[in-house]
Image (tube, grey):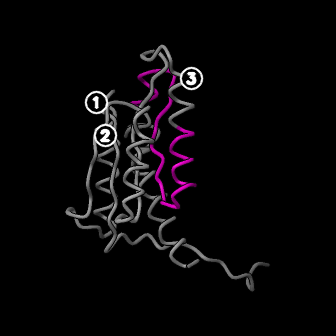
Amino acid sequence: MHQHIKTIEGRLDAKGLKISLVACRFNDFIVDKLVAGAVDYLIRHGMEKEDITIYRVPGAFELPLMARRLAMKKDLDGIICLGAIIRGATPHFDYVASESTKGIAQTAMDSGMPMGFGLLTTDTLEQAIERAGSKAGNKGVEAAAAVLELIRVLEQVD
């Protein structure tokens, strides 16, 4: 039915790209698993280790500003934001989750920089662990895959 419709898709090839990860130090025992997943994914898809830089920020609230600063430099192909906000551990959970999410989205829209969104927002520590490499996969891997695909699709629009 859709044989004659032109479809533009991104190939999952990271060769020659420069991508930075912005990762929270808060809940680092979770975030480190997200970082490891994202880095492993990028390398397995052809990226060189020296083309990956990891920037550590205190927490999720600081992710958007760091991402914006990196996006303004214009020497990257993409940015992956990684963090974990756990309701039980953060009294101002809703505010931090909402503002961090909005800030990352706004940075992507304002800058045109492809952004991978790997910010976990969970009710419990167990849910965060599940999303950082156990039962529910690894959201760091998913964020890396999404940014890689977006970079490659956007290349075909210009």
The one nearer the camera, 7 or 110, is 110
Quarter containing the N terminus:
bottom right
Give the residue at x 44% y 17%: 90
**Dots 2, 1 in contact, CB < 8 A:** yes
The amino acid marked with disc number 3 is Asp
- The residues tagged by marks 3 and 1 sit, at their Cα atoms, a distance apart of 21 Å
In this rendering, position of residue 71 left or right of residue 4: left
User: Label 2: how many residues lie within 10 Å, few (<14), some (14-19) or many (20+)?
Assistant: many
Q: Which residue is mark 1?
A: 29
Name the mark on residue 94.
3
Give above or below for 156 relative to 39: below
Furthest residue in direction left, as rendered: 50
How far from the left and from the top, in percent, is residue 67? 41, 48
Front position among marks 3 and 2: 3
Nearer the N terminus, badge 3 or badge 2? Answer: 2
Give the residue at x 54% y 71%: 154
**Dots 3, 2 in contact, CB < 8 A:** no
How far from the left and from the top, in percent, is residue 24? 34, 35
Front position among marks 3 and 1: 3
The amino acid marked with disc number 1 is Phe
- The residues tagged by marks 3 and 2 sit, at their Cα atoms, a distance apart of 23 Å
Residues drawn in magenta: 101-129
**Dots 3, 1 in contact, CB < 8 A:** no
How far from the left and from the top, in percent, is residue 20? 33, 55
Quarter containing the C terminus:
bottom right
Q: Which residue is mark 2?
A: 33
Nearer the N terminus, badge 3 or badge 1? Answer: 1
Give the residue at x 58% y 77%: 157
